[in-house]
Image: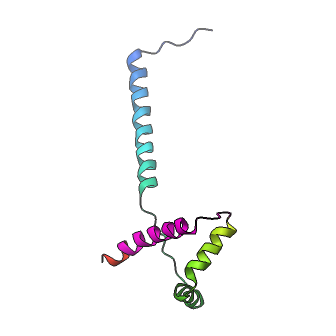
């Protein structure tokens, strides 16, 4: 069975159209992936009270160290506290700049 002969220019034009469409789709996917995601968290009154109690707990750092231990991170308490301090400092800096 003989294959139909298609002009090279037609093939190039069709492939060009396909390539342009693929690039458009790829750009749209990249923009969608890089768009900021709105993740607003709304707490109930009970959750707000519990969160504030946790933050005001004088044993907060001890509780965090205990949680590290439950996760399998043992020893080097000073380094664990430094990691917490660095993380909190970064978020406090952002919060207090306004």
Magenta residues (range): 72-93
**Residue sitting nearer the eye, 71 or 26:** 71
Q: Residue furthest top?
A: 2
| Residue 11: percent from left, percent from top | 43, 21
Magenta stretch holds residue 79? yes
Q: In the rendered view, would you say 52 is above or below 36? A: below
Using the image as rendered, state which of residue 12 and residue 39 is in the foreground.
39
Magenta segment: does it hold 61?
no
Residue drawn at (57%, 69%) of the image: 77
Residue at figure coordinates x 49%, y 12% from the top left? 5
Q: How many marks?
A: 0
Quadrant for the N terminus in the image: top right
Is 46 in front, or is 30? 46
Q: Quadrant of the C terminus?
A: bottom left
Q: Position of residue 80 (x, y in %)?
A: 55, 67
Visual colour scheme: rainbow
Residue at the image point whose x is 38% and y is 25% from the top: 13
Main SS, magenta region, reads helix
Q: Which x, y percent locates residue 21?
A: 42, 38
Q: In the image, is 37 to the left or to the right of 96?
A: right
Instruction: Say left or right for 55 vs 7.
Output: right
| Residue 57 image-quadrant placement | bottom right
Instruction: Relative to 5, say whether 79 is above or below.
Output: below
Measured as percent of width and height from the top left, residue 35 is found at 41, 58
> Residue at point 52% right, 70% down?
81
Splitting the image into 4 quarters, where does residue 27 fall?
top left
Most extreme residue toward the left is: 98
Compared with residue 30, is residue 73 higher up or lower down, i.e. above or below?
below
Q: Between residues 84 and 9, which one lies in front from this camera angle?
A: 84
* Left-right relation of 12 to 83: left
């Amino acid at each position: 069975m003989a294959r139909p002969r298609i002009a090279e220019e037609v093939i190039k034009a069709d492939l060009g159209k396909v390539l342009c469409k693929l690039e458009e789709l790829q750009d749209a996917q990249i923009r969608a992936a890089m768009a900021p995601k709105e993740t607003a968290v709304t707490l109930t009154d009970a959750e707000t009270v519990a969160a504030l109690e946790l933050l005001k707990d004088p044993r907060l750092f001890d509780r965090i160290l205990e949680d590290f231990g439950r996760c399998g991170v043992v020893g080097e308490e000073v380094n664990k506290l430094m990691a917490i301090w660095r993380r909190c400092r970064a978020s406090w800096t952002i919060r207090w700049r306004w």
